[in-house]
Amino acid sequence: MSKLERFLESLYKKYRTLNSGKLASYIPQLANANPDWFAITVVTTDGKVFTVGDSQENFTIQSISKVFLHGMALEDCGRAALLEKVGVEPTGDPFDSVIRLDENSKRPDNPMVNAGAIATTSLIKGNELTERLNRMLEMFRRYINRDVFIDVSVFMSERATGHRNRALANLLLNFGTIDHNIEEILDLYFQQCSLVVNCQDLAMMAATLANRGIQPITNQQAVQSEYVRDMLSVMHTCGMYNYAGEWAYRVGIPAKSGVSGGIIGVIPERAGIAVFSPLIDQQGNSVRGLRVFEDLSQEFGFHLLDVSMGKCNFADCLESD
Ligand code: GLU
């Protein structure tokens, strides 16, 4: 067994009984999740998979999709045009804040808050919704390396309850950021949140970003490498809701989380990491996920800015002894 596998096992044992936090409850499908689900997966940039727990359990990706739509919008319209519509500034406010958009910024602060994600979604090219949806699914397929699906029941619930998102879209229309096709843009936004993934898929997607946008198994370019920098920078500063600053300080890994309990983290040139555990804290981050990432960062020296202990030789930790 490798050092990494032993450490993953120990993390799984250490945190599986940590039961603080709550299930997301704004739609029934998330409230019905099993609070015991717990998985940790690491995929290296050369495609080795290390995993413990319920790594094949399906759930909807929720806000983690925002990272990948950001990449797609960059490819579709370029860095300068995207920056005109959406900034790259962390907010410290809740991800679905309406007041911030209306009273402060008028322009979404970054692509990880809902207003920004709705704006990036509006930039996805395609003649009508079906074409844009198909292009989006094809993009996710390149990262995940299997067929991908939307959970229709989650999509319908998101659409039926997404009043704040509808308010944000209306404000964006008022500011001239998006065009009048609000319901189509929102549908594509709700569909991306409803993509079905498991923990291993998420780690594979993160490993693709760690590997300059090249999927480690297929060697296919999932996103142009020049845009990986943009995606990781925004993850690093804005990816963990209004815990992003503390996360950057404590964990130091570009990451994104979602309210269904997933967190992805990218260790450039080395690995992608994903944790899934649906009990989330008040900010929306998986409680076990936060602890697991903190321990992993500490153990393997993953904090990008930590020069004190030198980087461990991660490759050695992957070898069986
Ligand atoms: N579908 C959710 C929303 O737009 C995303 C929640 C999340 O994971 O942040 O409200």
Image: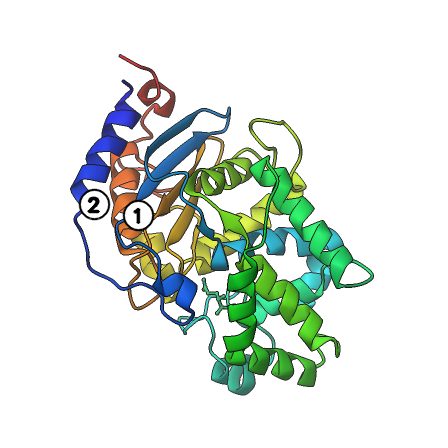
Q: Residues within 10 Å of mark 1 (few under 14, many from 20)?
A: some
Circles 2, 1 touching at the beta carbon (< 8 Å): no
Q: Which residue is mark 1?
A: 37
Q: Which residue is mark 2?
A: 16
* Label 2 – label 1 distance at C-alpha: 9 Å
**Amino acid type, residue under disc 1 in the picture:** Trp
**Coordinates of residue 4 in the picture (x, y in percent):** 30, 27
Q: In the rendered image, is residue 28 in sight?
A: yes
- 76 or 192: which is nearer to us? 192
Residue 245 vertical position relative to residue 220 in the rendered view, above or below: below
**Coordinates of residue 238 in the picture (x, y in percent):** 46, 60
As drawn, is 187 to the left or to the right of 25?
right
Chain-order first, disc 2 or disc 1: 2
**Amino acid type, residue under disc 2 in the picture:** Arg
Residue 171 vertical position relative to residue 243 in the rendered view, above or below: below
Which residue is rendered at x = 51% and y = 56% of the image? 234
Q: Which marked residue is nearer to the observer: mark 2 or mark 1?
A: 1
**Among the 4 quarters of the image, the one containing residue 317:** top left
**Coordinates of residue 172 in the picture (x, y in percent):** 64, 79
Which residue is rendered at x = 27% and y = 64% of the image? 22
